[in-house]
Amino acid sequence: MTRVSGGTYAAVLTTTTAPRSVAVVTGLLALLVVLASKWGERLDAAVHEGGHALAAYLTGRQVLAVWVESNGGGATATRGRSRGAGLFLTVAAGYTGPPLVGVCSAKLLSTGRVTAVLILAAFGLVALLLVTVNRFGQVLLIGMLASLIVAGRYSPDWAQLWYAHFLAWLMLLSGPQSVLILHRVRRGSGGGSGSDADLLALLTHIPGVFWVLAFAAFSLWCALRGATLLVHA
């Protein structure tokens, strides 16, 4: 428990590992959400656009605005050079963002750092909220941020444990699903959908289908690696 003058700030769980049953049940719940509702897609879209925005910022591009839509789509507007590594990394960070967040969260959870997952997620949401301009995206991010604050400050240890695992699974499982959606959209449009894969094809002169396969391979590797970390923690 971490205390500051005036009272308790948060219950910080630094060495709490979950029983295998927690990992299995939260994984099944996350799979149900991903398959049966739009909320998995919406949260995935938020992290996807956050990946674009973070990569743009780190490579010296200006982040102008982010949109997260209720249909699971989104967009990130940046300003900078029209070619080069910065733009390449910015575009590539979208579909790799949620799986990477998922596997990093799984790694932290496997070593018992439950509150670290919640705190880092909260910081990420605050940063993304600062550049999100549409109403739905703002409401989604504020709602998620509120849930993290409730879990981290007011909830018992077991609730933090379950919620952190559920969020990690959600990122791990939504990554492959989003790549499958990308494939379907590109197939329906004949490969000219203006997707991240098509933008990477324009930048690198490597066919878009290669980037779809690369996204799929990365997201599946993250899902398998994250599942291993969570179940065998």
Image: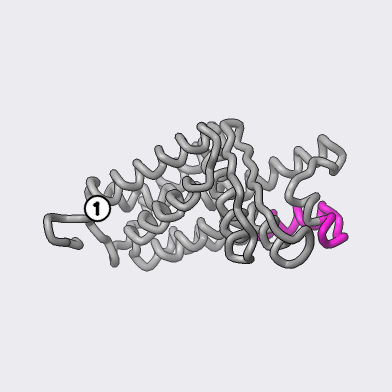
Q: Name which residue lies at 83% across and 55% down.
A: 201
Give residue 79's quadrant in the image: bottom right
Residue 139 position (above or below residue 154): above
Stretch of the chain drawn in magenta = 201-218
Rendered location of residue 29, percent (x, y): 44, 41
Q: Name which residue lies at 62% across and 54% down.
A: 52
Instruction: Please indicate whether residue 218 sits to the left or right of residue 23 in the image.
Output: right
Quarter of the image where the C terminus is located? bottom left
- Which is nearer the eye, 164 or 131? 131
Q: Crowding near pointer 1: few (<14 within 10 Å), some, many (20+)?
A: some
Q: Magenta stretch: residue 205 in it?
A: yes
The residue where tag 1 is placed is: 157
Q: Name which residue lies at 21% across and 55% down.
A: 9
The extreme left residue here reads 6
Is residue 220 something that shows in the picture? no
Instruction: Please indicate whether residue 170 sits to the left or right of residue 96 in the image.
Output: left
Quarter of the image where the N terminus is located? bottom left
Q: Amino acid at mark 1?
A: Asp
Dominant secondary structure of the residues highlighted in magenta in the image: helix
Q: Name which residue lies at 67% across and 58% down.
A: 90
Q: Specify how the rendered protein is coloured.
A: one colour
Rendered location of residue 151, percent (x, y): 30, 47
Is residue 194 something that shows in the picture? yes
